[in-house]
Amino acid sequence: MTKYAINERKQDKLNRLNSKISQVQYQSEQLQAIVNSLTQKNNDFLGFLAEAENNRNTASSNFNLVNQLIDGIQEMTRKTCVTTEQTLVTDNTIKATAKQVSILVDQLIYSTEIIDKLSQVINKKKAIRPVISNDLISIIDSASADANNAMALTLTALNNCYLAFITSTEADKVTQLECKQSIKLYSLISGDEQGEKQMLDALTKLEQADVQQDESGYASDESSSTLQEASNHFQQTVTNVVSFSTIDPNKETGEDKSLFYLLHQANEEAKAKHDAASKAGSKVQNELNQAQAQLARATVNLESLKAGLAAATAAAFAV
């Protein structure tokens, strides 16, 4: 009876060990399935993170390129606008010079006519009164020749002025168009519509001052002063806009957003997606680490239980 009771107690112990092993085995299988799933999930998130990092690097590179592009366009705009201002001022200088040479020609024509008439009068008097000095006749003839030579040279100078005026006028039109297109390109890329308006308004005032100078015949001190003020204002405005203006990357510009704004937004979104992928990947990695630790503990526990069952079974059969 005692031997049978002992065997019952040992069998009950073995049954409990077997039941415990089954539970731990089931838990281990569940943990293994979780580890497998999290491993696959972690690999997927590592791929997402690699793609997000690549997109972030590309977006950052594009944004740096558009910043370099804006720097180049700002410099081009500054130079074209300076060229426009200098060409316009030079054009006015040429016009004024041509006007002065034209006045000089009129004066030379008058002087030549006076000298010729004087020469005719003296020659007539010489025919009547031979006592008139030959030296005087020689001086008058020389003065007449000099006047005619001066007339020829001045007419040549006037012709050159007009040729320079035509060339300058054409250059003025080209440089003004180039300046306006540079300003519009700067606004298109940067989205700085306010800077565009300021520069175009200053250019319009400069053009108006040029027209006023034309209408005044280049003789008005007031118009000259207005042109100089407009020129200085234009130079200062361009310098302020392209050299010191701060472009707001978060500012939308009209229906068509600027290239700078779009690439800035793309860069910010790429960084946000990379950060989100990094956080999600870290979370999955932590979950995987925890599941692997739990599986390792369950495996150690299972092996320990199996070893205990083997020892208990051996002990039961040994009695």
Image (tube, rainbow, N blue to C red):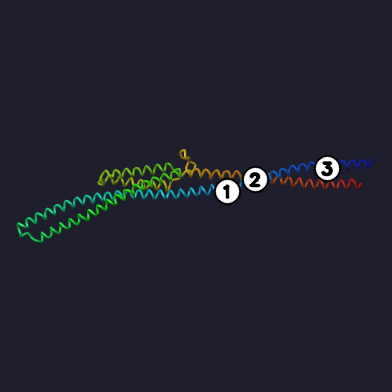
Comparing labels 2 and 3, the label whose residue is closer to the camera: 2
User: Where does the image place residue 236, in percent across and percent down from the top left?
Assistant: 37, 47
- Residue type at numbered disc 2: Asp
Give the residue pinned by disc 3: 18
Q: How many marks?
A: 3
User: Where does the image place residue 214, in percent across and percent down from the top left?
Assistant: 28, 45
Comparing labels 1 and 3, the label whose residue is closer to the camera: 1
User: Where does the image place residue 227, in percent across and percent down from the top left?
Assistant: 31, 46
* Inter-mark Cα distance, 1 to 3: 53 Å
Give the residue pinned by disc 2: 44
What crowding class fits label 1: few (fewer than 14 Cα within 10 Å), some (14-19), or many (20 or more)? some
Residue at x-position 61% and y-position 44%: 277
241 on left or right of 21: left
* Inter-mark Cα distance, 1 to 2: 15 Å
- Residue type at numbered disc 1: Asn
- Residue type at numbered disc 3: Asn
315 on left or right of 35: right
User: Where does the image place residue 118, in percent across and percent down from the top left?
Assistant: 11, 54
Q: Residue furthest top?
A: 255
Q: Nearer the viewer, residue 298 or 146?
A: 146
What crowding class fits label 3: few (fewer than 14 Cα within 10 Å), some (14-19), or many (20 or more)? some
Q: Secondary structure at mark 2?
A: helix
Quarter of the picture holding the N terminus = top right
* Inter-mark Cα distance, 2 to 3: 39 Å
Label annotation for residue 54: 1
Q: Earlier in the sequence, mark 2 or mark 3?
A: 3
Label annotation for residue 214: none
Residue at x-position 79% and y-position 46%: 302
113 on left or right of 314: left
Q: Secondary structure at mark 1?
A: helix
Q: Earlier in the sequence, mark 1 or mark 3?
A: 3
Q: Earlier in the sequence, mark 1 or mark 2?
A: 2
